[in-house]
Amino acid sequence: MPCSPDGPESSRKLLMRPECLNSLFRPLASLKGAGKTTAPLMAKLVGGEKAVDLLWHLPSGVVDRRFRPKVAEAPPGALVTLQVVVEVHQAPAPNAPSPYRVLCRDETGFVTLVWFRGRGDMRGLLPVGAERLVSGKVEFFDGVPQIVHPTVVPLDQADTLCRVEPVYPLSAGVTNKALGRLITQTLDTAPDLPEWLDAPLKAREGWPDWRAAVRAVHAPETLQDLDPTTSARRRLAFDELLAGQLALMLVRNAARERPGRVLAPTGRLRAPTLAAVGFALTGAQTRSLAEIDADLTNPSRMLRLLQGDVGSGKTVVALLAMLAAVENGAQAALMVPTELLARQHLETLRGPCAAAGVSVVLLTGRDKGRAREALLARIAEGSAQIVLGTHALFQDDVVFHDLAVAVIDEQHRFGVQQRLALAAKGRAVDVLVMTATPIPRTLTLTQYGDMDVSRLDEKPPGRQPPDTRLVSLERLGELVAAVGRAVAGGTKVYWVCPLVAESETSDLAAVEARHAVLNEALGGRVGLIHGKLKGPERDTVMEAFAGDGLDVLVATTVIEVGVNVPAATVMIVEHAERFGLAQLHQLRGRIGRGGGRATCLLAYASPLGEVARQRLEILRATDDGFLIAEEDLRLRGGGEVLGTRQSGLPGFRLSDPLLVGDLLATARADAQRLVAMDPGLQGPRGNALRTLLYLFERDAAVKTLRSG
């Protein structure tokens, strides 16, 4: 079937996935050899449940089985393929610990094949007197060559064995052989797709067609073929980047084409609010507010990302943006990920809003019955001018009188659909999203290309950076004693433990054990929070720590963002070498928020490698979150820049922006040119690009197009 539909139903078909992609989008479980047990394991490994996900899982190594010496010429340690005759089986007694051995020979000597486990009876695979091809690494035992757990095939299958075999990243329950068979099946049915690349660019780079490229990356001949700079890998990396950039441009254009409203700030409410805040805006705050005001006075809808380092003053800028809506007789909403953070925002905003005569209310899932009904009534009639809340804000029974500005804090905790659901509560809503995570410019392009970006890269005057030191975990006793002294002196202390996806069970046990040790040593005023606790339980512990109930909080990275406990001036991060730099910077931003000098101790496990020491030294040397984020990206790569899969940053399957930064710039420029020339993707190349968008599952972008 063609990938570019035409005829009377072409407009409708342009919004459907092209039929030529059907073979790639069939369920992984439908492939031969992917049964009910295997398919879920494969899906977890390759990151999806469709055949195409197999193609995006690239080899990381090669095994070359083409070397076919005689037995006597096989060098120790070499990977060889030998043609031998089976002589005798040496099967151990049932349940005996001895290995199963099979003695084989050729005209030059003898070789022993050895199986230590899963041995069964090898006579069916290796009948005595039969010729076989056996492949594996040669070792010598008592002067006799042997191969442990060899690969064995009949002579007529030499073509399947005597070749370069790609080696893939694997996980428990998945073998390289089984994965390779599924990838080969998918490659054999992969279609020829229409060419979406710019012809001069393709010719200049010497890139193959898509189908040839995807076959080439799964058939490496040498280790050099695994390099990201090969033409096939660069072609596929560019495809992924182009799909991402084009999707972002299309979504952005669609948002800008929808009619907005003009919200020109008058300053009537801003002036008394700033007077109540009590300090002048920094240059970065003034610049960012001017960019926001330009958006608000423009008839197009605002969609802007406000990036601000810890303590850079994002909340004040957000408040001033919301006041523009109130000055124009409309409402504003601020959505945050947790009830605790929502209540902290209420405490922060209540005074300045009262000085300006602006009503601010809080709506969370905890509000029930008549109290909730009263809040909803105030929101619906418009007397609640600024509404703070959690996910409760976009529930069906929340009706705004006239929502004009929506601010979303810690936006990576929310999905795009949640953002849209809040914006849908009003008419032509201007949206400002905020993050306290400094994001490297490269990743800002790839993740937030649909937004305008403002950066708060200054701190308010007077805030001192934390005193950050490196301490070996061998001095654990001294650390516990130091915490005791700090608590006795009236400060509060965070003790942060790692929790990573690969070993959640053992790490959780370690967090609980550390809590028990500290609780015993410090007299019982030690709290514990981690991701397994439910939201209300976490909030209860945090409220006790923020108040008078607890002195020490043992926590995982759930305290990374938003939490404000001014009395906390000491933080110990256990196994700091396991965290990303940006994540460590976020964590230490929780201390010293009440003024004065704070101390962050990065406790590491010895011996600390040179690269790990370099990373931690960067954190000790600077408090500039944007510089730290760039260094983290350089040292760790885009996929791990925050040290957590829940970071909200993009996961690149075929491209690494650090290694192919030139391609990202080219893809962005190409996407801008395409959208300017053919905004509906109706031309010949435009139709091919629709196929590209569907191939990389950017369907939502296609559906924003005006298709006739």
Image (cartoon, rainbow, N blue to C red):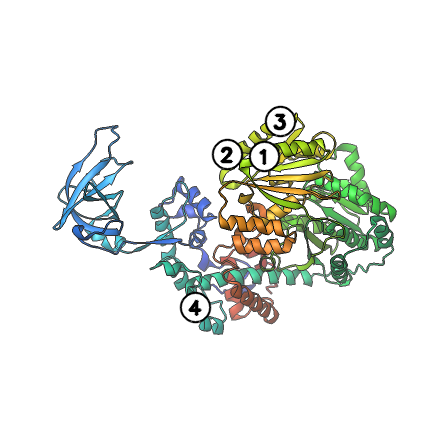
Q: Residues within 10 Å of mark 1 (few under 14, many from 20)?
A: few
Residue 235 is left or right of residue 430, and the answer is left
User: Residue 650, image x and y in percent?
Assistant: 56, 53
| Contact flag, marks 1 and 3 (Cβ < 8 Å) | no
The earlier-in-sequence mark between 1 and 2 is 2
Q: In this rendering, does residue 594 appear at all?
A: yes
Against 626, residue 354 (above or below) is above
Q: What residue is shown with label 4?
A: 207
Q: Quadrant of residue 383?
A: top right
Q: Residues within 10 Å of mark 3 (few under 14, many from 20)?
A: some
Q: What residue is shown with label 1?
A: 532
Nearer to us of marks 2 and 4 is: 2
Residue drawn at x 83%, y 47% is 352
Residue 614 is left or right of residue 318, and the answer is left
Spatial CA span between label 1 and label 3: 25 Å
Q: Secondary structure at mark 1?
A: loop
User: Residue 63, image x and y in percent?
Assistant: 32, 53
Q: Secondary structure at mark 4?
A: loop
Pick the quarter of the image with the C terminus.
Answer: bottom right
Nearer to us of marks 1 and 2 is: 2
